[in-house]
Amino acid sequence: MFLRNEWYVAGLSHEFVERPRQRWLLGEPFVLYRTASGRAVVLEDRCPHRGAPLSSGEVCGESIACGYHGFTFDPEGICTHVPGMQTIPREARVRACPVVERWGWVFVWMGAHHEVDLTRLPDYHWLTEPGWEGRSEYLSVKANYGLVRDNLLDLTHARYVHRKTLGTAAVTDHPINTEAHGCGVRVTREMPGIEPSPFFRLMGGFTGLVDHRQQIDFTPPCHVVINTRVRSTAGSAENRSAEFHVLNALTPETERSTHYFWGLVRNFALGDDTVTETQQRLNRETFLEDLSILEQQQVLLDCKPDGWRPIATRNDGGCVQAERLMNRLLEAEVPMRKVQ
């Protein structure tokens, strides 16, 4: 089950072009394209005539024509043309999703149109805000989006999975603090006076001891922002500081696969393309290490024996609170769907 009355990322802005593409979202097929006037559109990718995919057709100005029999639909999903027919059947329409394009990402509302709530749009403003620099990318993960979420909320795995990049023994030596509130979950970890990880040695030039702070914010249904601040420990011969935001949007493709949209932005070395390329490469390699674990985890969870349940520890506080929050939201939304 997925929350419907929420914003999900359907794609990066550069993925929306005149040539339509199919993308499955929340277990359903959709067609993504950009009109001649530049509007990003997300429609159900199933022509009501014979069920052919609209994504196999072509964009004609502001509309898209099915590649099977030429039925043409506008951005609202209404059929505007049927070859050889004067009268268009009333049923000739497809579902159109409300769309907001911002910060180089295209967000789609997957629920009822009358429930659209712009205040629930997640905040990724660092992608375009002056004083920050970085890029966005996409990964396909063959695992449930909840597993990806939990991977981001519990970073103790970095010591073992990311030995060459983010790994540091301090991540398991310092406890986390978990705070659940009405709108989400926050996990923080303070690590004063530790050795810098390989990533910060390379990216920030740190050689001496540092004070390292992690703050992870989860916002339903699938948005995770990781804020990492590193600065030279007081009294150190160095006087350096660096801050990153890792921006994560985990859009379910199916129950067992996820569209992983991510961005990494920093507040130093602005305008340095070499630094940008390096940070993207290192972060991509880090995520690929996660992906290898997550996809194996999904396979084993799919065949778990009856009654098997994962063991929770203090470090799982963010994961546990996020799961509880999602369950409450799902329980509240299901009766609303039945009424509608």
Image (tube, grey):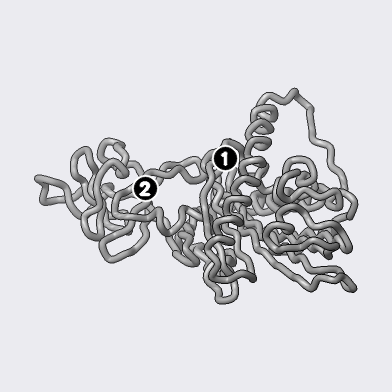
Give the number of the disc on residue 238.
Answer: none
Q: Is mark 1 on a helix, strand or loop?
A: strand
Q: How crowded is mark 2: few (under 14 residues within 10 Å), some or many (20 or more)?
A: many
Q: Which quadrant would residue 191 be assigned to in this image?
A: bottom right
> Which label lies toward us, 2 or 1?
1
| Residue holding disc 1 | 141
The percent coordinates of residue 223 (x first, y second) are 62, 56
Instruction: Note whether 292 is above or below 38 in the view shown.
Output: above
Q: Distance between the residues labelled 2 and 1?
A: 20 Å
Residue plotted at (88% across, 73% down): 234
Instruction: Note whether 299 is above or below 21 in the view shown.
Output: above
Horizontal relation, residue 11 to residue 208: left or right: left
Q: Which quadrant would residue 189 be assigned to in this image?
A: bottom right
Residue plotted at (85% across, 62% down): 209
Query: Can residue 150 be seen?
Result: no
Query: Can residue 138 be seen?
Result: yes
Q: Given the image, on which type of amino acid does mark 1 rest?
A: Val
Give the number of the disc on residue 31.
Answer: 2
The percent coordinates of residue 199 (x first, y second) are 71, 54
In the foreground, 134 or 92 = 134
In the foreground, 334 or 66 = 66
Q: Is mark 2 on a helix, strand or loop?
A: strand
The percent coordinates of residue 54 (x first, y second) are 30, 44
Residue plotted at (79% across, 45% down): 159
Horizontal relation, residue 220 to residue 88: left or right: right
The percent coordinates of residue 312 (x first, y second) are 84, 42
